[in-house]
Amino acid sequence: MRRLEYPPYFSRMERWNLNGAPSRSNARGQVLGYLPMLPPLSPAYFTGMQEEALVLDLRSPLSYCAAHIPGSLSIWEDRLTSFAGWFLPEDRPILLVSDGIPSQEVLLTLLRMGFDRLSGYLQGGFLAWQMAGLPTTRIAGISAADLCAVLDSPTNAIIVDVRNQEERERDGVILESLHIPLVELPGRLEEILRGGQLFLLCGSGVRSVIAASLLERAGWHDLAVVQGGMTAWNSQICPPPHE
């Protein structure tokens, strides 16, 4: 029987349910049912707060890969309930980036998980950041066919498979890939050798972007997400038959 994993915030919420939540003078929503009005922050002001805060990018994986604020964490707002509890810090302010104003659903989700140090959002969305001429970076993508070509030649590439074990057993694996489930990635970075290009693989390509953002924050830069994930890989014949 496999052990069920649960995110770190579960233990915190259990303590709070038993003993009451701690009082925080800078919390922006301590009463159940109260949704705070987050302050809009100009790009210049946002930049000044980055050093002490975590920047959470809520945009789609495709938008994040095309361009994002260096060091930001990507969790698509549709996946917040699944992954915010694994990767967001309890003890740091959180700044939000979206295509506009973060939705009330986003705020409610974060507050219910105990992430109440929400310090503001980027006014004007990511477009305002770009128009201000501030630094951006991107995550490369690679198709399953192109990855096949890379692996068919001498290479120092490393494939990091962030799916869970059940998915690997059901959908197959790429031989010699390094298996580190996404939720275990922050604690297992030392297993990933530096110096080669990393190709990040999941089921469809969404979780790989979260993994890429975590690795970028930890100092990796030669990264590529396998577009379409294992679903796309299984649609290919690798190596391709020779004519």
Image (tube, grey):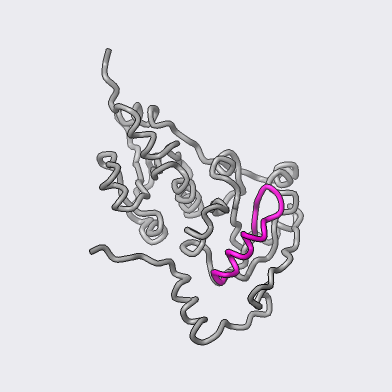
Q: Most extreme residue toward the left, as rendered?
A: 1
Q: Residue at x 74, y 46 (%)?
A: 128
Q: Most extreme residue toward the top, as rendered?
A: 243
Find out whether residue 21 is within the magenta segment. no
Q: Residue at x 26, y 16 (%)?
A: 242
* Side (left or right) of 21 relative to 120: left
Q: Quadrant of the C terminus?
A: top left
Q: Nearer the viewer, residue 16 or 196?
A: 16
Q: Is residue 201 above or below residue 19?
A: above
Question: For residue 90, which quarter of the picture?
Answer: bottom right
Q: Most extreme residue toward the bottom, as rendered?
A: 19
Q: Position of residue 136 (x, y in %)?
A: 62, 44
Find out whether residue 98 is within the magenta segment. yes
Q: Residue at x 39, y 44 (%)?
A: 203
Question: For residue 30, which quarter of the picture?
Answer: bottom right
Q: Nearer the viewer, residue 95 or 105?
A: 105
Q: Position of residue 15 (x, y in %)?
A: 48, 82
* Side (left or right) of 85 relative to 199: right
* Side (left or right) of 26 relative to 75: right
Q: Quadrant of the N terminus?
A: bottom left
Q: Position of residue 19 (x, y in %)?
A: 51, 87
Magenta region, residue range: 96-114
Q: Is residue 16 above or below residue 158?
A: below
